[in-house]
Image (tube, helix red, strand yellow):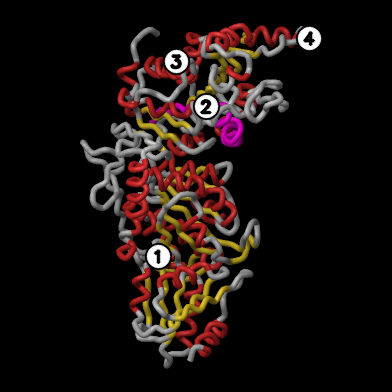
């Protein structure tokens, strides 16, 4: 039976994770994500899962990768400073194709910044923070309901593509309390197992090898070094490296339009807002306040890999307006894919989201 | 002790290995594998985990599931594996730089948690993989590429550190003392909780070459003559007598049964 509740975003994250079968959480307390660790500490022991508080975020990331290799659906949650510490092991998860979910409840940065205030300053760090050429997946909720659904979805995406998958939320959604419909159950799509006779890092056309969890008799060697299809290090052959890294990159990038998850409203509009996360809420208010005007709204629930084709859903678009809680990170990504349309970045930092009046002023200026 | 373990436990198709001629790591690997074999552990239930460095290449040559992780972080991955599936047997290979410098915090916390695994540190007193830089275990006065005038910083006593941090079984031997080392590892494998085995090893290439121990046999001989039984060290300390220069304690530092985490269900 589905049920209606009034719930905090961070709790919805936990509920979504547990519904998706998350059975391992390794974390370290950090504002404004701490409620997620606290709730996992409360809930996981009762569902047969494991909660462990690690000594730092580097260790948290290591623990969830280790747990994932036993077949667990593993997760950690953090905010900016901890996210920075996780970068090296995130790259390790990419290189070793380890499914795991990393929740970042973003706060104001750089450095310790504004621990209790909302921001979206880590969007590019999520995409490019770890060294080397990588491609991963990032979901961004704009409501408590989406926090639940997208966290659950992140586990399926992580398992399907064998990549670390990010829930790039923020203090606003994390600490917001809202009505939420908890479904009867959520779809769980388990990772594809390694079949007998296949090599552990040998991929078919989809670029994704079968997974051999530890203890299953496949005797897999897992290394962050450049490796061949057997998993054996081969660090000097240019062809081996190019083949591996391109496969890791393309297995995600080539499916970016299939992965895409978005809402497109008023697709005939000339002025179109592109949002992700809490800024979508303000845009929805602007549209609600001006029902007679045709204002477009593209809200991305998955930002990485960037679904540039979604912008083509607005054939009349003359201006894309991108309000975001940073100094214009995704606006640059939008600009990279436009063909003549004006790209108006509306950055806002300091901890508060845009007001509807601020956004509508920008619409009026484009008339 | 003399049973052949090679065919059963090693990946023959990974040879030749990367260890230099005269390196002590192979000796420690063999002692470890003999100990694991003596435990009659199932290959498919056993996982070898390591960080980065010469010693950390060991799991790549062993035919079990194995996890060659990031520098200093092996114990965090091992914690995740063991806590998620306590039925797996975990052995961690690490080195003095990996464990005590970049991984120092994880080391003390793994000991504190007393997670049921055996950690074997090949202490060659140097960063071997990167060509011989000083580590927290390079003795005062010894030459490395980053201590060209002699190391000036005091060293970590890894065994004493593990005891203080809470590990259930701690021992130190050398690549000369193969029988004692193998036995200490066996005791570690059969002890619930974290077992820490420090194996002093010779690194003729990066350490011996710069410290008047050019020949492999010179280094092994140095370990033989400078290793002093822990009981004797304790006695000298009690009597207020000095420990001879450059000598180090070998033996069993602790064996106890404090509550452990990640114990087999």
Q: Which residue is mark 3?
A: B31
Q: Give the label, 1 or 4, closer to the camera.
A: 1
Q: 10 Å neighbourhood of mark 1: few (<14), some, or many (≥20)?
A: many
Q: Give the label, 1 or 2, closer to the camera.
A: 1
Q: Which residue is mark 4?
A: B240
The residue lying toward the viewer, choosing from A153 and A319, is A319
Q: Is residue A256 depicted above or below A241 in this figure?
A: below
Q: Give the label, 3 or 2, closer to the camera.
A: 3
The residue lying toward the viewer, choosing from B107 and A224, is A224
Indicate the position of residue A316 as horizontal and vertical percent values: 36, 85
Q: Which residue is mark 1?
A: A306
Q: Which residue is mark 2?
A: B194
> Is there a contact, CB below 8 Å, between mark 3 and mark 2?
no
Q: Secondary structure at mark 2?
A: strand
The answer for how far apart the CA atoms under marks 1 and 2 are is 45 Å
Mark seen at residue B252: none
Residue A286 lies within the magenta run: no
The answer for how far apart the CA atoms under marks 3 and 1 are is 52 Å
* Mark sitting earlier along the chain (4/3): 3
The magenta segment is B88-109
Q: Residue at x 45, y 85 (%)?
A: A287
């Amino acid at each position: 039976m589905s049920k209606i509740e009034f719930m905090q975003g961070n709790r919805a994250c936990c509920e979504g994770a547990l519904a998706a079968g998350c059975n391992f959480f390794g974390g370290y307390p950090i504002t404004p994500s701490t409620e997620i660790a606290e709730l996992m500490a409360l809930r996981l022991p009762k569902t047969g899962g494991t909660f462990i508080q690690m000594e730092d975020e580097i260790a948290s990331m290591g623990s969830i990768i280790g747990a994932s290799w036993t077949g667990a659906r593993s997760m950690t949650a953090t905010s900016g400073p901890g996210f920075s510490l996780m970068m090296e092991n995130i790259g390790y998860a990419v290189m070793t194709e380890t499914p795991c979910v990393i929740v970042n409840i973003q706060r104001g940065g750089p450095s310790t910044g504004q621990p209790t205030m909302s921001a979206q300053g880590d969007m590019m760090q999520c995409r490019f923070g770890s060294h080397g050429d990588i491609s991963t997946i990032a979901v961004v909720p704009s409501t408590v309901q989406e926090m639940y659904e997208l966290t659950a979805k992140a586990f399926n995406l992580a398992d399907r593509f064998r990549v670390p998958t990010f829930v790039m939320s923020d203090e606003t959604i994390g600490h917001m309390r809202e009505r939420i419909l908890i479904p009867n159950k959520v779809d769980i799509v388990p990772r594809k197992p390694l079949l007998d006779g296949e090599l552990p890092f040998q991929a078919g056309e989809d670029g994704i090898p079968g997974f051999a969890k530890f203890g299953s008799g496949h005797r897999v060697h897992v290394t962050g070094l450049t490796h061949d299809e057997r998993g054996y290090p081969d660090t000097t052959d240019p062809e081996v490296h190019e083949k591996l890294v391109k496969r890791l990159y393309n297995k995600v990038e080539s499916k970016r339009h299939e992965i895409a998850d978005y809402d497109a409203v008023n697709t005939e509009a000339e002025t179109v807002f592109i949002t992700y996360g809490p800024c979508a809420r303000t845009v929805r208010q602007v549209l609600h306040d001006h029902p007679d005007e045709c204002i477009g709204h593209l809200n991305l629930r998955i930002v990485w890999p960037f679904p540039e084709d979604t912008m083509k859903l607005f054939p009349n678009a003359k201006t894309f307006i991108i309000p975001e809680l940073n100094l214009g990170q995704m606006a640059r990504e939008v600009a990279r894919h436009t063909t003549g349309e004006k790209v108006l970045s509306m950055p806002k930092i300091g901890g508060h989201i845009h007001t509807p009046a601020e956004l509508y002023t920008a619409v009026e200026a484009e008339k | 002790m003399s049973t052949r373990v090679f065919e059963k436990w090693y990946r023959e198709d990974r040879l030749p290995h990367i260890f230099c001629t005269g390196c002590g790591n192979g000796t420690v690997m063999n002692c470890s594998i003999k100990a694991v074999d003596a435990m009659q552990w199932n290959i498919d239930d056993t996982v070898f985990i390591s960080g980065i460095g010469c010693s950390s290449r060991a799991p790549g040559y062993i035919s079990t599931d194995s996890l060659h992780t990031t520098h200093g972080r092996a114990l965090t991955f091992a914690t995740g594996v063991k806590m998620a599936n306590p039925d797996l047997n975990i052995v961690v290979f690490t080195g003095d730089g990996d464990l005590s410098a970049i991984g120092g915090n994880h080391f003390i916390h793994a000991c504190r948690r007393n997670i049921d695994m055996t950690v074997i540190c090949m202490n060659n007193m140097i960063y071997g993989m990167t060509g011989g830089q000083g580590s927290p275990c390079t003795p005062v006065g010894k030459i490395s590429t980053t201590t060209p005038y002699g190391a000036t910083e005091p060293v970590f006593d890894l065994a004493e550190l593990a005891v203080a941090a809470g590990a259930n079984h701690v021992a130190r031997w050398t690549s000369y003392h193969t029988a004692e080392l193998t036995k200490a590892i066996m005791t570690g494998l059969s002890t619930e909780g974290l077992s820490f085995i420090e194996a002093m090893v010779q690194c003729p290439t990066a350490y011996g070459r710069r410290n008047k121990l050019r020949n492999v046999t010179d280094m092994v001989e140095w370990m033989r003559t400078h290793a002093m039984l822990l009981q004797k060290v304790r006695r000298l300390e009690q009597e207020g007598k000095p420990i001879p220069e450059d000598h180090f304690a070998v033996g069993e530092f602790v064996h106890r049964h404090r509550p452990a985490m990640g114990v087999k269900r």
